[in-house]
Amino acid sequence: MTSNDLTTRLATTRSVVAVALLFAANGLIVGGYGGALPSIRERLDIDATHISILLFASALAAIAGMQVGGRLSDSIGARQISLAGLLILVGAAIAFAFATTFPVAVAAAMLLGLGNGTIDVAMNAVGVQVEAARKRPVMSSFHALWSLGGFTGAGCVLLMATVFGLDGSSIVRPLMLFLAGVAAVALVVAVRITPPTALVEHTKDGVRTKIPAVAWLLGIMAVGFGLAEGTGTDWSSLHVTEVARVDSTTGSLGLIAVSGFMVVIRLIGDRLVARFGRRAVVRFGGACACVGYATVTLVSGLPLLLAGWALVGLGVGMIAPQVYAVAGHIGGGRVLAVVVTFGYGAFLAGPAVIGFLVTRFGLHHAMAVPAVLAAGIVALAAVMPRSDSDLGRAATSGQQT
């Protein structure tokens, strides 16, 4: 297949649907797993320490999957690695369905982490090539589908409990088998419609090129938005409950505000990028997140707290798709692996760091830390290209570095 034929295939609406399907299926499995964790804990009769081990095992496997998946995406093809990652996720869901002992659950968690890390980098790499072929922004929409998939996966827990009267440990097997089945159908469809992808070379005159310096700056930005997003996801409901002195059910409005506005901005984010450029969008996103975190640090009334958390969701929702897009355009899966790993690590570790600060300074004031990091993103956004023409020059420069 010639380069022109490949570009034509990648530019079709069918290719956009294929990548959106990969993002949604990935989010579905991860969201369902997250929603089922309390039931998994009950099923295995384990405590918080064991849950931490599950999450840690999954995280380590995910980081390994990102590093391997990114390089294989460049050398073999991001299409193949994305499909392989989704297949591993299906296997992980099935493993959790039948995991009745803790060691088996740990193995399932590692399988899930490996699949998630692999597809995370590879599907972004496919998305970047689709975006380049279509010559207009589309990455924000893909990330919105991931968020919607995660919301749907978590919602399936409540849906199955309501419709079938399942609760506690009894919901784990039917839920995970259902998610595996849906993801398997998505995999079959994805095999048929996901376009072939170009290989990305990292050699010049027979010598392997270095990772471009800008990748590490993008990685620092990823730490900032990873910690900001992770804190919003893990601490918003607790923060609202404690600071506004409301019950835990009302406190959940904090997470709803973060998640809801994150999805909304990602659904319209591509149009904003086309109109204002990636640098402006990332700067505005960092500013929104900074103002949002500053707000929740300074106020205590429920309406203002929810407004602050909504600004956090609005801000962080803008940043990741554009940072990942630039990473992929500059250096393919190899650079994506670096940046995604930074962001993923901060997303996982950040809330724990915030937890330590909470014990020292209180929940209210600990939110100042992600506010400062979000302000840093505004400054670091200078490394982002202003326009797609600048992005093309940056991609060429990065590949020649």
Image (tube, rainbow, N blue to C red):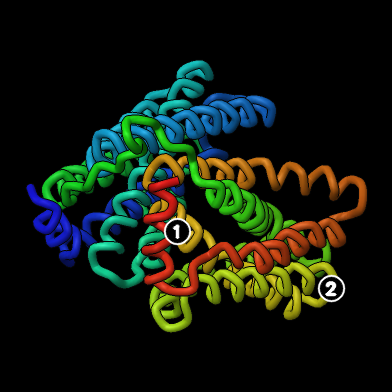
Q: Outermost residue toward the bottom?
A: 275
Q: Residues within 10 Å of mark 2 (few under 14, many from 20)?
A: some
Task: Specify whether residue 399 is in view.
Answer: yes
| Residue at the image position 66 percent from the left and 55 percent from the top | 224
The answer, for residue 172, to whether it is visible in the render is no
In the picture, the disc for residue 111 is none
- Classify mark 1: residues with Cα within 10 Å, few (<14), some (14-19) or many (20+): many
Per the image, the residue denoted by label 2 is 300
Q: Which of the 4 quarters of the picture holds residue 151?
A: bottom left
Most foreground residue, 373 or 350: 373
Q: Position of residue 187 (x, y in %)?
A: 21, 43
Residue 259 in percent (x, y) is at: 55, 64
Residue visible at 68% across and 66% down in the picture:
379
Residue shown at the point (35%, 53%) measured from the top left: 23
Position of residue 346 in the picture relative to residue 371 (left or right): left
Q: Which mark is residue 326?
A: 1
Image coordinates for residue 311, horizontal then vertical, percent: 64, 74
Above or below 169: residue 151: below
The C terminus sits in image quarter: top left
Residue 140 vs residue 38: left or right? left
Please give the name of the residue rendered at 53% of the width and 74% of the height, measured from the top-left corner.
281
- Report whether 362 appears left or right of 263: right
